Image (cartoon, grey):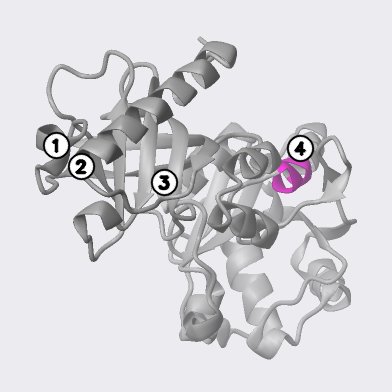
Amino acid sequence: MKVIRSLDTVGSSGQGTVVTIGNFDGVHLGHQAILRQVVFRAHELGLTPAVLTFDPHPARVLSPAKAPLLINTVRQKLARLELAGAETVLLLPFSKEFAALTPEEFATRVLRDTLNARVVMTGEDFRFGRRQTGDITKMRELGATLGFTVEAIGDIAAGPRAERISSTRIRGLILEGKVSRAGRLMGAPFTLEGSVVSGFGIGSKQTVPTLNLASENELLPGHGVYVTRARGNGEGAFVPSITNVGMRPTFDGHAVTVETFLLGDGPAERPERLEVEFLAWVREERKFASPEALRAQILRDVGCAQRFHRRFPARA
């Protein structure tokens, strides 16, 4: 997949594209349904399926207090867009200068000059350009001049209940600890990734040894214990694990930590990076009377996680 990160590369998309536009946080089942339409249309016309998306999220620039915590890191989003069939992604740095582009400038510089758009697929309520003064009617007018057509995409329901899926809904589920439901709406488990960092040495001495994740994701699950799978350094298969997200109240912790205990054969040495897939809720985080009481509970949690993994083994 080709990733373009600047408007300076004129005509960088080659033969022409079918483009859809959005933030695509989570790249959930609704997004995937849209992307299937884009891919089908592109292949039908002999064009390249493309996505225009942004980093940071526009709200982070225009209304920071209302900006959502993002589900995916940029790396995760790009990987999921590629898996969904995108062949070109224009990942634009969103800024106040970019937000100030008029609808005409947006259509010319972004859609025509950079993406070489032939078809733009977007929702009926799409707004663009300075102060969101452009709408789909304006986009069609500009396309007639600039050489692309505009095709509207209706609301898409996805999943077994045919419900309308949104990134906002998925964020809420993750914050509530409902990671299993969130994963079903995303079509894949919610995953944290980041560097493995040194902890306080408490686990290895008083409870169980864990890998401590410095998450690069903005959004963390609600505090609690989860059935997870983990993989070090992006290599090999995911290993069954159990993960605590929270404040370590038994030890009077003052910062949120993400601690993963591997239940299978992990790397021989502590990995530098870790990915953790969240599969199911086990229990809330709580304070125990002693490290021994916490360790006994962890062993019960491990038994719960092992039963889950036996029932739902990872696919090869």
Q: Secondary structure at mark 2?
A: helix
Report, in whole angstroms, how far the alpha carbon at label 2 lies from the one at label 1. Answer: 6 Å
Residue 239, by quadrant, is top left
The numbered dot on residue 206 is 1
Q: Are marks 2 and 1 in contact (CB under 8 Å)?
A: yes
Q: Secondary structure at mark 4?
A: helix
* Amino acid type at mark 2: Pro
Disc 1 versus disc 3: nearer the observer? 1
Report, in whole angstroms, how far the alpha carbon at label 4 lies from the one at label 2. Answer: 51 Å
Does label 4 or label 2 sit earlier along the sequence? 4
Q: Residues within 10 Å of mark 2 (few under 14, many from 20)?
A: some
Taking the spot 49% from the left edge, 65% from the top edge, the residue there is 69
Looking at the image, residue 29 sits to the left or right of residue 222; the answer is right
Report, in whole angstroms, how far the alpha carbon at label 3 lies from the one at label 2. Answer: 38 Å
Disc 3 versus disc 2: nearer the observer? 2
Circle 2 is placed at which residue position?
A: 291
Q: Residues within 10 Å of mark 1 (few under 14, many from 20)?
A: few
Q: Toward the viewer: 278 or 287?
A: 287
Disc 4 versus disc 3: nearer the observer? 3
Taking the spot 48% from the left edge, 73% from the top edge, the residue there is 94
Circle 3 is placed at which residue position?
A: 75
Q: Is residue 248 visible?
A: no
